[in-house]
Image (spheres, rainbow, N blue to C red):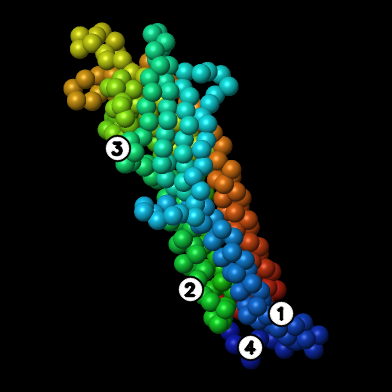
Amino acid sequence: MLNPQRSLSELPKMSAASQVERAVLEEEFNWLLKEEVHAVLKQLQDVLKEASRRFSMPTPGLESQLKQENFILGSSTMDQVKGVLTLQGEALTQADINLKVAKSSQVLHFQFREDKMWKLQQIQDARNHVNQALGLLGSRDESYHFKTGAEVNKLMDAVMLQLTRARNRLTTPASMTLPELATSGLMKMFTPPMPGDVMVNFYINLSKLCLTVYQLHVLPPNTTKNYRPAGSSVLHNPGAMFELNHNRFEVSHVHKVECVVPWLNDTLVFFTISLQLCQQLKDKISVFSSFWNYRPF
């Protein structure tokens, strides 16, 4: 391996053919830095702007370009929970839920209060990461001249980090404890108010919008049942226990329903395309680096 710090004059004499090859490589590499890098950056910006547009937040009082989309929640295995969710960008602007109570077969009906909307934190976080990636790309306009491959790689690594974080927010829902769910602001969104023995949670999993409904029962103070509080989880199972306001509860029934949101699937595809573009550019840099290993790429 040749020392990257050595000057050209210190290198061993090369044959005329080697000098020509090296000159051709240098010309190709300079073209890559000057032209192709910026072409890839423009392509990345176009793809990510489209992703960011899907995430936009509706502006109160102004006509939003984002259309409201209604999604019917359902499950092929049970009908205890049915509902319709209205999604506009990162905000759930309405939720209409019917819950058939176990044992009594009574149907409870809840919907968002008219003055409320629920921001889906996963979509909000993913949008923020996309916008950070766009900010990084925008900091190097077409007039900027990249001097080394290392500089390009550093930018690609930073962009890829933001894109990976954005993708992970949509593919990995946050774990929550049952007391966190019980005291969540989501529980105050509904009219009529949720009864004390029902909890709900919304989250994104890949391209699906999911609703989980928990039915609870209070454990008697003198119960001999072995009390073991549940930890943090995306989905809690029947039998999970927790304590809140000096009362102990046990999950008796869990109902999960979901619907596919097509534009979330599109967004995940945009992330994959963008990550591939970044990696392909890094691979081209590494090809020159392997041929031209004395230069610090």
The numbered disc on residue 28 is 1
Tag 2 secondary structure: loop
Task: Please name the amino acid that badge 4 sits on.
Answer: Leu
Q: Residues within 10 Å of mark 4 (few under 14, many from 20)?
A: few
Specify which label sits upstream in the sequence, 4 or 1.
4
Answer with the quarter of the image where residue 2 lies: bottom right
Residue situated in front as seen by the camera: 158 or 41: 41
How many numbered dots are placed on residues in this image? 4
Mark 4 near mark 1, Cβ–Cβ under 8 Å? no
In space, the residues marked 4 and 2 are separated at their CA atoms by 33 Å
Dot 4 or dot 2: first in sequence order is 4
- Depth check, mark 4 against mark 1: the one in front is 1
Looking at the image, do the residues carrying marks 1 and 3 touch, with CB atoms under 8 Å apart?
no
Local crowd at mark 3 within 10 Å, few (<14), some, or many (≥20)? few
Write down the residue under mark 4: 8
User: What kind of residue is marked 1?
Assistant: Glu
Q: Are marks 2 and 3 in contact (CB under 8 Å)?
A: no
Residue at label 2? 139
Q: CA distance from mark 1 to mark 2?
A: 24 Å
Residue behind mark 3: 185
